[in-house]
Image (cartoon, rainbow, N blue to C red):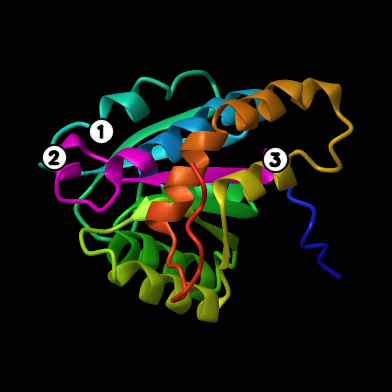
Amino acid sequence: MTHTRIIDRHRTLMMICDCQERFREGTHGFNLMAQSITKLIKASRFLKMATLLTEQNGSGPTAEEIRSELTGPQHLGTFGKDCFSMITDEIRPLLKNYDNIVLVGIEAHVCILQTALDLLEIPRFRKRVFILADAISACHELEIPLALDRMRDTGAVVTTSEAMLFQLMGDGTDSNDKPISDLIKAERTNTAKALETLLPHPSGTATISK
């Protein structure tokens, strides 16, 4: 039986997709998405959780606030790509070391969706895939909830950055994880703004107080 509450941080890889400066202006809530991703990268250093970054070839560098945080031995590198999916020839061999894949970045209905489908539907992968809804976006915000529904229907877990971090911390008793708790508290205002902006809200749902 699979215990879905338990996520082994050492068997988890966060894949950051195409968050390039060129796309900032045209992407819904890019700055808030970038703040969520930056929070996750900072936490990954304490968690010793692996990360990797992709960039669409020919579209310039990743946004500085994200790129500058990607340091340390847990970062596997930056990989250029021409296809939509992040599962390139360079990245494919790395996946054997991980059971859980966390997807963040853009665009929800294109690269994130196609990567999730590859990870979930190709038999040799069959990973547990987590989509962090306050750390993905798209040029048109109405594409996002439809992409989330499609990925959820295919077997991905749609959750949030904060929920993911708490789950990676296990039962919360490890004192070494205190810096992560402190980071979550420090980022609470930014997290609330990202949730309000990037997550689909049913009609009549109250906005999150600032």
What numbered label is drawn on residue 169?
A: none
Q: Is residue 207 left or right of residue 3?
A: left
Q: Tag 3, which secondary structure?
A: helix
Binning the other alpha carbons within 10 Å of mark 2 as few (below 14), some (14 to 19) or many (20 upward) gives some
31 shown above or below 152: above
**Residue 50 falls inside the magenta stretch:** no
Q: Nearer the viewer, residue 152 or 119?
A: 152
Compare marks 3 and 1 and give the one earlier in the sequence.
3
Residue under numbered circle 1:
62
Quadrant including the N terminus: bottom right
Q: Which residue is mark 2?
A: 22
Where residue 65 appears, x then y in whole percent? Answer: 33, 25
Q: Residue at x 56, y 46 (%)?
A: 161
Neighbour tally class for label 3: few under 14, some 14-19, many 20 plus, Cα within 10 Å: many
* Local secondary structure at mark 1: loop
Amino acid on which the number 3 mark rests in the picture: Arg
